[in-house]
Amino acid sequence: MRIAEVIGRVTMSKLHPALRGGRFLISLPMPADALLEGSSNRGEEVIVYDNLGAGPGSLIALSEGREAANPFGKTKTPVDAYCACLIDRLAL
Amino acid sequence: MQIGRVLGTMTSTVKHESFQGERILVVQLEGVNGRPDGEPVLAIDRMGAGRGDRVLLTNDGQILQEMIGRKTPGRWSVMALPDES
């Protein structure tokens, strides 16, 4: 998982049935200089499936790849970016 | 397995249930000759590593699933605290 900043949301008109009930965040992964020195550098935009209710400006734990679909268990779900935590605090 | 440097800790209350009660570290992975490798990652730690420590991480999701549950969205976990070489 990486740390990402939520900058907005994407609303969908048509959805794969397995994705119903989720929200879709626009998030930017945070490099070390952003986390440690507050630089405005960000990684490439990632659209993230969210069911924790992250809002713009919040930081999230961004799970990617195979394990992003783990929370859906057996049901085949086309998710490869998942919001795993709403970050309260980073003590760096 | 990869070596990393602990930058600090992350706290979160609203999170996937597999992370309940787990300690989550922010780790900068290190490539060859200690150069930073990619963005910092979040790793589950049961070894009690602290800020500034070097840690040995695994990205084998299987190991983490056995530790905290098959549905976890996590990947990285701390396997060992290598002595400072």
Image: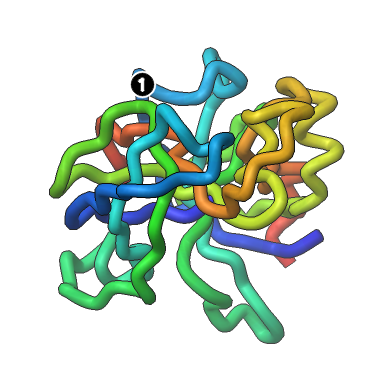
**Mark 1 — residue?**
B14
The chain to which mark 1 is attached is B
Q: Nearer the viewer, residue B8 or A35?
A: A35
Q: Secondary structure at mark 1?
A: loop
Q: Is residue A67 left or right of residue A1?
A: right
Q: How many marks?
A: 1
Q: Vertical placement of A4 versus B73: above or below? A: below
Give the percent coordinates (x, y) of residue A84.
48, 35
Give the percent coordinates (x, y) of residue B11.
36, 29
Q: Residue at x 69, y 60 (%)?
A: B84
Q: Residue at x 78, y 28 (%)?
A: A74
Give the percent coordinates (x, y) of residue A71.
63, 29
Q: Residue at x 50, y 38 (%)?
A: A19
Q: Is residue A83 left or right of residue B79?
A: left
Q: Is residue B81 left or right of residue B5?
A: right
Quadrant of the image occupied by residue A22? top left
Q: Vertical placement of B73 versus A44: above or below? A: above
In the rendered image, the residue lying farthest to the front is A14
Q: Nearer the viewer, residue A15 or B12?
A: A15
The amino acid pointed to by label 1 is Val
Quadrant of the image occupied by residue A61? top left
- How many other residues sit within 10 Å of disc 1, few (<14), some (14-19) or many (≥20)? some
Way the structure is coloured = rainbow
Q: Nearer the viewer, residue B7 or B61?
A: B61
Give the percent coordinates (x, y) of residue B6.
51, 52
Q: Residue at x 31, y 35 (%)?
A: A87
